[in-house]
Image (cartoon, grey):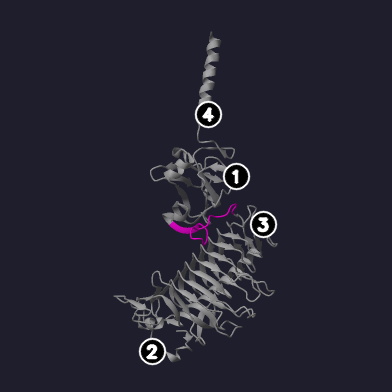
Amino acid sequence: MSAIFSFLKDKPMILMALLIMSATAIPIASVNANPTELHVGPGYTYTTIQAAIEAAEPGDTIIVHEGTYEEQLFISTPLTLRAAEGETVIIKPPPGTLATIDVNYPVPGGSKTRTFAPLIIVMEVTPASSVIIEGLIIDGNYELIDRGYIGTEDPIYTGIVYVEFNGTIRNCVIRNFRPKPEQTDLFNNGFAIWIVGDSHVTVEGNDIHDYGWMGIVVDGLATVTIVDNTITGWGPTIQTGQNGIQVSRGAYAKILSNLITGNIYTGEDWWASGVIFLDATGDVIGNAIVENQVGVDGMGDVTGIHVNFNNIYGNTLAGVYNEDTGSLDAKCNWWNDPEGPTVGAPPKSGDAVYGDVEYSPWLTAPLMADPDGTGVVASSLSGTDTTLGFSDSNVDVVVSGSAEVYVATYESNPGTGFMGDIGNYIDVYVPDVSGLTELEIRKYYTDGEIEALGLDERGLKLYWWNGTDWVLCSDTGVNMVENYIWARIRTDTTPSLSDLTGTPFGAASVWPVGGAILPVDLTPYVLMLILAAGIAGIILKKTML
């Protein structure tokens, strides 16, 4: 254990357990063979959540029923903490002063100590353990209490803290961890989620808003997947710098399909970012990063940061800002302009990029919004001699060899218009094709879609956009049994494997001529040919006579 529990002096049972563990080796958790449900609420066995946590065995589930619970929670047992289905459960800080905890955790080349005033803290007791927190409303209640972070020595007021622990934070609302309006100190604010140390945590499907400084902090060697969240800053303010997600000090974050917005600071000595990396690495894929001051900010060594297939627009200072060393990969993003980003200047039409940023190729049309309203339809998968399923784009990719493959769906045509197409456009990107011998793209359709368009299913083929025209793939066809249009791409095909640098594909049922596609209904042309043949026959007959 790497922490000093200043708030455990009034919890003798937990304190004694920790003292015992400090003198002995920490065993690996044994999950309860018969996990049980512990219910919390009026009329149930437990009236407080903490009492149920202390009674729980590894693997148990705590179901919290309707109500507002003013508690500070300490979790040291692998368990699930869940709101009862269909019931509203709100956790708020108890009256008075929150207990604090000093947390020492590893960072590259050493360690760091932070003092937290958490509402819920998950601390390591046994390796390889997991805590799931699901369906709760965690309310910092900023209007009624005077808690925050002032300078470097004061406790950081935080909704959920994971320290050296695995788990999932799912479908929660985490709100109101920010200063009162009259508090004007730049650092007087709160944090929604902080994950530190060798933690492996998934943050999924949450609504995180009204945080004072950070929505999610991933720090000190932690590995975190942040997916399908709505992360909304406090909005324009001179009182606090805000960041939706901060990844720092050797941590790694996979940031997928989130809506990240409203992180804005109007003071002179700070700016606010949707995502900021401080000597850390991560993949930012399929997000809508909109209407912040800076979309993505990289500081330190940025060579391990990849920002691909996002809609990045409306960020007032920059879409992507590289402040330090190395080249930051920001290829295949939509910058709100078919002409790409504005370079080295405040945004005009397309969001700006500053510093050493690889922004080409860029997308020439926006990506389709996710049905859940968070990010966009874009994802990446890796595999060897396998079929990768991109269900959101209705695409399978058959990999012969090894590759990482990105597939995204455009909201509109990324090239010039052409007749006879199915009105659906995807992008395929393979950063490294050296391990590939062939890639087969399978774009699925329904009979109803094709019938509604009046297209001939037998003629469906895939086309690719070469930057000027829609060009027929040289090895393409249709599987009418399984309803997919296919194209096989190799070094000797059009397009070739080397062209998969962010390549739009569309589909149509007839061949293109000069970048346009002929109408599918050929009846008028057939009648014209018959008429012409008839006229020619009459002329020939008269000539012979």
Q: Secondary structure at mark 2?
A: helix
Residue pointed to by mark 4 = 525
> Mark 2: which amino acid?
Met
**Sequence-first disc among 2 and 3:** 2
Q: Residues within 10 Å of mark 4 (few under 14, many from 20)?
A: few
Labels 1 and 3 touching (C-beta < 8 A): no
> Mark 1: which amino acid?
Thr
Can residue 536 be found in the magenta stretch?
A: no
Can residue 376 be found in the magenta stretch?
A: yes
Q: Quadrant of residue 249?
A: bottom right
Q: Residues within 10 Å of mark 2 (few under 14, many from 20)?
A: few
The front one of 269 and 26 is 269
Q: Quadrant of residue 58?
A: bottom left
> Mark 4: which amino acid?
Tyr
Residue 349 badge: 3
Labels 3 and 4 touching (C-beta < 8 A): no
Distance from Cα at disc 2 to Cα at disc 3: 61 Å
Mostly what secondary structure, the magenta segment?
loop
> Mark 3: which amino acid?
Ser
Residue pointed to by mark 1 = 416
**Sequence-first disc among 4 and 2:** 2
Seen at 53% across and 10% down, the residue is 544
Residue 13 badge: 2
Which range of residues does the magenta coloring cover?
363-383
The front one of 35 and 502 is 35
